[in-house]
Structure formats: C-alpha cells, structure tokens
Amino acid sequence: MPSSDNRGKLFIVGIGPGRTEQLTGRAKEAILESDIIIGNDFYLRLVEDLAEGKEVIRSSMGREVERARRCVELAREKKVCMVSGGDPGVYGMASIVLEVLEHDASVIDYEVVPGVTAATAAASLAGSPLSGDYVTLSLSDLLTPWEVICKRMDCAFQMGVPVAVYNPKSRGRPDNLAQALTIALKYRDDDVPVTVVKNAFRDEQEVRFFTLKSLFLDDSFVDMRSIVIIGGDESRIGTIGEKDMMITPRGYDRKYVY
Amino acid sequence: MPSSDNRGKLFIVGIGPGRTEQLTGRAKEAILESDIIIGNDFYLRLVEDLAEGKEVIRSSMGREVERARRCVELAREKKVCMVSGGDPGVYGMASIVLEVLEHDASVIDYEVVPGVTAATAAASLAGSPLSGDYVTLSLSDLLTPWEVICKRMDCAFQMGVPVAVYNPKSRGRPDNLAQALTIALKYRDDDVPVTVVKNAFRDEQEVRFFTLKSLFLDDSFVDMRSIVIIGGDESRIGTIGEKDMMITPRGYDRKYVY
C-alpha cells in the first residue's frame, strides 16, 4: 500500500527507554503515519501496539548496516519508520542511516525524531545524578578500538564529573567494566557513589547503589541492559523518606540556605 | 481543590525541547493529573494548553531555590507538577527539588519524569553529530566557578569526542564561548565542524554550520537559547539531497562497505 501522497519518507525515530508512555507525541505520530516499521526485534516489541496493521520488518542486533540499507530502499516509495531505542542519535540508528542516505542517488525526505536517551532515563530513576556536566561513554569495542575507549576514559575521569556508561557488559566482553572501574579508581575515591539501573522503564526494572570500590569487587549485577552512572567529585547518596537516591547538586548550596 | 485521593504528590517533569509534540506521554499525564503547575514562565508558555483550568504558578529565571521550596510546600497536600525544560535531570529542576525534599520533614511522594534533553534534540536537527561518546558541558558560571569549567574543558577537548555546549552565552557572560573555543583550538583542528542550533523545536528555529575557527572569529549568531555542538575527531559535514548535516560516524565504515 503506497502512502497517500505517493511519495516516500524516512523517519528515524527514538522510542525512548521502554514502555510507550515514554514515547514523545511526534515519535508516536511518525510510527502511526508510516506504511512500514523496521527495527531491532527487541525495540519493535515495545511499540507493537502502535504498529498494528502495518508491515513490520524485524531485524536483529549486529545487522545495523543491512537494516539501514533496507529502510533507505523502501523509503524511495513508501513511508518508512526506523525505530531505535532511546534517542536514535546516541548509539542508535541515525548515523548509519544518514551515511547510507548520503551514498544513495535518490533524494529521500527524512526526519530524525529525538527520544529520551537511556542515560537521562536511568538518571530519573536514580534521583538526579547527571544534574550538571557529564560524560556519555560506551564500553562496546565492536566499532571503537578498546585503546581509544581507554584513552577517552583517562580524560573523562580526570574531569571530575559523572560518567554515564552505556553497554557496560556483554557476553563477548565481560571484563570491560572492571577495566573501566580500574581507570576510574586511578582518579576517584573508593567511596564515590555509583548507580546501576537495569531495564529502565521496562519489565524487571531495578535500581541499585554501589561505591566505585564495591562495584569493582563485584559487578555481577550489571548486564548489557544496564546503565552505570559513575559519580563525579560532588555526587553523593541522599535519602528522601526511606528511599535512597543519588544526586549531583548543582551548587545552589554554595549560594543559598535551604 | 485537593487531589481526589487527598494525598500530595510531586512530579518533576521534563517537557522536552519545545512544542508539546516533543513531550512524552508520561509527562503529559503528569501535567494533566496535577492540581498545580509551577515553573519558569518561558517553559510554562510551551505547555499552557495542558494546564488549562489548573492553578499555575509562574516563576522567573534565577529563582530556582524559591520555586523548589514552594513546590515542596504545596506538594504536602496537593498534586504538584514542577515543569522543567528538556530533561529535568540535566541542568534542570530535579536536583534542587530533591535537595529541598531531603531537608523537608514530611515524606512526600515524588516522581522524576525524564524528557528529551536539549543536546539530543539539537543533534536530531543537525543530522547525527552525537552518535557515539560525547561530553555535555555548560558555560554558565553562576553555580560552577569558571576555573573549574576551564579545567573540565581541557580534559574534554583532549578526549577527541564531540562536546555539546549548553548555556553558551548570556548578557552577563558574552565572552565565555570565545574562551571555550580557544581551549578547543588548543586540541582540535581549525576546520573541525561545529553546529549551532537555536530555538530547537520552537518558533524561529535555526540551524547553522561553522568550523571551530569560523565560529571563533564570529560567534554573534549564538545566544543563550542556542546549543553549540563542537565536533570530535571523526565528525564531518555531509550532504543529503541539497541539505547539509553534521555527522559523527560510529565506525561501521571500518567494517562494512555501503
């Protein structure tokens, strides 16, 4: 079924962290407006209610280039929505799709629809650990050499600000997190707070607080669906009611009494 | 009018970059569910359709501590929604509200509702400049001493990854951006691409591309409502159709042909 105006369009849509209530209105619209929905099966499941009656093309992790090529081909004539977890521009599908679009001779109308990225989604469940400056870093060395990641971490941990770690672990690289924490411990105190958020806004959501040292000693809780937020020099654990939370104050306490 | 179940609750809600279509479903729900909406007037205007019929408390920039105290007081008995631009946990209202909650004797139920943060919103309009690791940095020295910000920049620009700059300029500090670009030029080439996104997803939205050197020579386009994305070692300007975009490839090109 061609789209009503007979012209193709490609949406690259961030669906946010999980449940559809975390989608933006524009992301929802883009999915509903499309003829074809394409994406990693894990993320497609999260929005399947919205995709009802549409052609759905399921792809698997690691097949991003193939998936990007496919959506560009289809978008020459139809409205196609490439769904991406979190924000599509952060470790998501936007860059590879745009690279393929660059090389494509046909001129395809496209729109990148931003979403809530995993770091701030996780932060919202932990308290407010990323209130000020921070670094976003992935420990996946599939596309970036590990030496480059280590060099970046050396600078990042010297900044003294929180570091939000994506892809902290996977079957293929179980030791990357331990190596990252070793670098962090070179520059930061043992008792700097660390929050691990697993499955933010999805089933089996879990939030746990550690210190740099305690997580270094046992990181078995962390998996590939976790975000690890390593505190900066000013981060601390606080308590509201009976509930712990991690916070990085912005510095109002230096100017005001409250 | 007390809330139906007669218990207070405090929502700290990120409304995303601008128009209401960039709100998440949960953010919308939280506003609609609340008795009282409180926030900076600039952000309240963006969601005024949703606040119809509710008590609205308008506050101005720089009165964050007072606003946080007020919302906590009110939330003892009513459902109160503190709105914050972008994501409330990134240079937003979450941290100061949680600090006030910590000191408050009453136990108030709260929820931080994440939103699309300004950096990724701006990135989506520019192409995909923040596809991999990146640094989030603010040039506002109201709460963080300028020497600390400079030390952070020294490390950040050595990382070789893109830097998303919030609060690049204001009347009170017109020269901070020039100083930041001077530090960037110590570590990065003159022709590194830089994108400035002004009023993302709001009226008078504008996207312009520069190089590090050209923006250093004339940064008059940048104002306090701009996000400046300084490219990393691998960032470049590309073209799709007739439209320029900035991209930081993730490295698929090192493994695949496309």
Image (spheres, coloured by chain):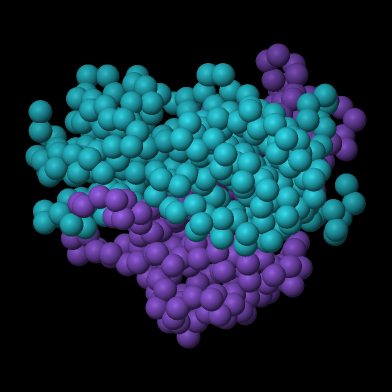
Chain colours: A purple, B cyan
Q: Position of residue A118 (x, y in %)?
A: 51, 53
Q: Position of residue B120 (x, y in %)?
A: 58, 42
Q: Is residue B90 above or below residue B29?
A: below
Quarter of the rendering containing residue A175: bottom right
Report if residue A97 is visible in the image: no
Q: Which quadrant of the rendered structure holds the N terminus of chain A?
A: top right
Q: Position of residue B219 (x, y in %)?
A: 65, 32
- Foreground: B240 or B191? B191
Residue under the point 58% across and 23% down: B205
Q: Position of residue B226 (x, y in %)?
A: 56, 33
- Foreground: B229 or B47? B229
Query: Residue lying furthest bottom in this view?
Result: A217
Q: Is residue A115 above or below residue A132?
A: above
Q: Is residue B87 shown left or right of residue B217? A: left
Q: Is residue B55 shown left or right of residue A53? A: left
Report if residue B212 is visible in the image: yes
Q: Is residue B172 shown left or right of residue B234? A: left
Residue under the point 38% across and 26% down: B42
- Foreground: B57 or A62? B57
Residue under the point 10% across and 33% down: B2
- Foreground: A172 or B97? B97
Count all numbered tags in the image, as a single digit: 0
Residue under the point 40% across and 64% down: A234
Quarter of the rendering containing residue B39: top left
